[in-house]
Image (cartoon, rainbow, N blue to C red):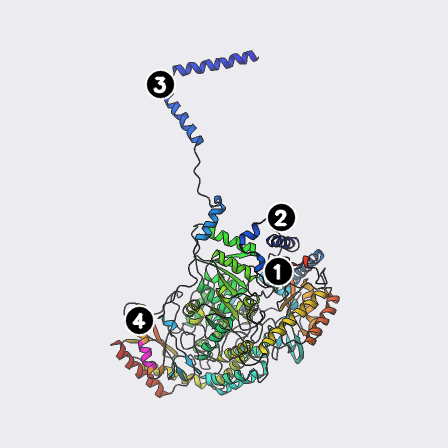
Amino acid sequence: MAAMAGVGQQWVLVEMVQAFYEAPAYHLILEGILILWIIRLLFSKTYKLQERSDLTLKEKEELIEEWQPEPLVPPVPKDHPALNYNIVSGPPTHIITVNGKECINFASFNFLGLLNNEKVKSAAQSSLKKYGVGTCGPRGFYGTFDVHLELEERLAKFMRTEEAIIYSYGFATIASAIPAYSKRGDINPRKARVTRRFIVVEGLYMNRGDICPLPELIKLKYKYKVRIFLEESLSFGVLGQHGRGITEHFGINIDDIDLISANMENSLASIGGFCCGRSFIIDHQRLSGQGYCFSASLPPLLAAAAIEALNIMEDNPDIFQTLRAKCERIHKALQGISGLKVVGESFSPALHLQLEESCGSRENDVKLLKRVVDYCMNSGIALTQARYLEKEEKCLPPPSIRVVITVEQTEQELDKAASLLKEAAQSVLN
Amino acid sequence: MANPSAVCNGHLHHHHHQKQNNLLKSGISKKNGITKGTKKNGVSNGTLYKKTFIEHFEQAPMYVAVFTFVGFAVGTIFGYLRDFMRAWGLEKRNIATEREQQKDFVPLYQDFENFYTRNLYLRIRDNWNRPICSVPGPQFDLMERVTDDYNWTFRFTGRTIKNVINMGSYNYLGFAETDVNALKTVTIELEKYGTGVCSTRQEMGTLDKHVELEKLVATFLGVEDAMVFGMGFATNSMNIPALVGKGCLILSDELNHTSLVLGARLSGATIRIFKHNNMQSLEKLLRDAIIYGQPRTHRAWRKIIILVEGIYSMEGSIVRLPEIVSLKNKYKAYLYLDEAHSIGAVGATGRGVVEYFGMSPNDVDVLMGTFTKSFGAAGGYIAGKKDLVDFLRTHSHSAVYATSMCPPVAEQIIRAMRCLMGLDGTTQGLQRVRQLEKNTRYFRRKLHEMGFIIYGNDDSPVVPLLLYMPGKIGAFARRMLEKNIGVVVVGFPATPITESRARFCVSAAHTREMLDTVLNALDELGDFLHLKYSRYSKSSHPELYEESRLELED
């Protein structure tokens, strides 16, 4: 058997040698080249992506040494407009002392003039005597005072909703309310459209002074099954016959709005904010509103001041009419200033004056408007430019001067302001 | 949030490793022949900590964990049972419901989210949101509140429970007071300025009071400049996005407060989490970040910022500041320190963890803190170099869009800070700090001796006492109230689900008698509810605790 195999093998070998001799030359050469090529491939290094995990310790240390971070903050130019802000000495009331000069205040949002009201101050004083200043805890851990509960009840009654919830910071109010209902955390609360289920609108837009078309929105709400969140910082205490805001202004049933949020820092001359609506909606925020659960509650003296301010609003419903009349008056008086156009509804207590033609860049516009403002301040009217974080706004409004009307301004003062603005525009812009 | 499943063994290993590492690093290198630890950090750890740093995180016995899970399981089963009965109308439905007209809208809440709220939280929710009607000093008056329908609704009987000892409010230095002399300047300023400001910082809202306050804060902390904001929570959530953005890396501690987490998320930077107070974990993350760069593109990070707190309010632990600063200097990262609970509460003169460890405020890039806890007011601040503060004045959301702090509150902070610094001519400030220190040590020592499991550092005035089982949360808080003591209990989701606790906040205003009353009550209640889980009832076994650097004074 082995012999047979041996013969078989030999036979194969002989055949091979014979084939070798009989093959044509080019065939042999080609095969030779192929074999050489295979041998070369087998022995050359394989091509790999340079892996960082192959770094030696020394190389890692070098990388760590070499890395330079950016500076923590980029340098701010010394003449940045926001660095040279106005310093107010004393209370920012009707007559305000700005940078040492006494002016009539057309810049603070003190619409109902409650900042200097004696009754409000004495309510705050008695609260101070009883409770001290701070609450030393969030609402869940002994930070709920009886004044907070009273304020929430009063607000709910005033706005004719089921329940209200207060926050200790105006900005945090809407910034905590919206994420409590939506899953994603990247919603900018000051802009109009939010995905899927909610429409967030402002009653009176602070950046433009115009009003939102609420009746049409209500129709859209039922048609498309979305919920409406209404932000009433400017319109609470201003619009409507009793100051209840835009729902009273348009005569809409308050239950149609899912959530109303407002801050108490404008009309109520206090600090903080509140949300009101049906219990179904508001109760959820008590456990998931981040600014409510994880932050200290509103100092009681501010809550007491807000309650007293509400009392005043309820007892004198005619101040809203007076305010509206003054707004109309100055709106008319400011028309026709050469170089500046008025932006805003005639009954909005905060209106904007924009340049009719821009001079090219935003920076130059801002500088020009600053000269107008300085002219007015030197002559006794305090104004301010509307400020924005330029990189953060999605639709940045053009630079403007903001004029704020309050109940305390007399008709002479309104006329004086209008004529002064005309003068300033004349001298600076022409 | 700590890993909820790391109950027994995971946790124990964690500490065991830490201890070993500490021994290795602490220079017993001669014994083991391993010098890697000390060489890596460059500085022998003996010189980093000037005083002993003792923290406890004792592990409960195994049966406790078992019973805790059983407790939650029972609660869940009953929850399903009740839901079933409510769905079939066998039990009353007390919750508010959607409007009739809006029934076909997309539902506002997930039903499951509410399961925990409805069936577990609701049963014991009378222990939270308790309204008070007096100043939150060392004692306060509670409004009596009863429920007729098992906590669905409450009503007030009109009576007040007087002189309840307050172990829940953040009143570390006792500045929440109504003493007429103390509040004299605040009263005057309230009369002069009123309560509101009605404008933002950049428009017409910067009052001379704010300028005065900011200068004082900067002097108090020993830095160049400071900026104050109206709300502590908002200080974090609005300024972290101004400092970092896309392309930056945030290294945040596991147990950071919600405001820091929110600020980090809003900034759009990449967030990586390191284990609580664990320097090895932090160092590994730093090294990996610099070596490997950003994910996928491997570009270098623009900057790396480390977010830590001074005292962690749920654990009572103090940050390991010297080690973090040496890491930060080595790897060129930036440090953001949130001293909400530690400013005023630790340190020889109340200047926070920076002073507690004997370091200079220039070591920390961004010093942040709040005025709510130790100063009895409201608001927050950020302090540091002048460039930093100028940048925040121009680029922070708060400066542009939010109303500034109200003047009477600013005055309260000014007078408290002046008292603390001794500028009002008395030593009252220092006395308060000393009293707080004494009270803290006494309280903690006694609790250890009684056999409770207490977390945290020996010097921190926040004292968490572990309850573990869900049934004991409600029982503990209610019985303490019956004894006229107001405590704070916390459970899931603020803590890991198996580690519910009661949290005491010691105050400088507590007298020895008050503390003794509380301790006696705790003793009784601990026996009654079987809360004394600790296996070491005398604090005299140094090798069993996680004491770093104590061995190293050689």
Magenta-tinted stretch: A371-377
Q: Which residue is mark 2?
A: B32
Q: Which residue is mark 3?
A: A25
Q: Which residue is mark 1?
A: B496
Residue B422 visible? The answer is yes
Q: Where in the figure is residue B259, as x and y percent of width and height? A: 52, 65
Q: Where in the figure is residue A235, as x and y percent of width and height? A: 43, 77
Q: Where in the figure is residue A339, as x and y percent of width and height? A: 27, 76
Residue A40's place in the image compared with A253, above or below, is above
Q: Amino acid at mark 3?
A: Ala
Q: Are marks 1 and 2 on the same chain?
A: yes
Within 10 Å of disc 3 (Cα), the crowding (few <14, some 14-19, many 20+) is few
- Helix, strand or loop status at disc 1: loop
Residue found at x 42% / y 63%? A73
Q: Would you identify the image quadrant in which residue B463 lies? A: bottom right
Chain under numbered label 3: A
Measure the alpha-carbon separation of dots 1 and 4: 55 Å
Count of number-bearing discs? 4
Q: Amino acid at mark 2?
A: Asn
Q: Main secondary structure of the magenta part?
A: helix
Within 10 Å of disc 1 (Cα), the crowding (few <14, some 14-19, many 20+) is some
Left or right, B373 with respect to A364, comes to right
- Helix, strand or loop status at disc 2: helix
Measure the alpha-carbon separation of dots 1 and 2: 37 Å
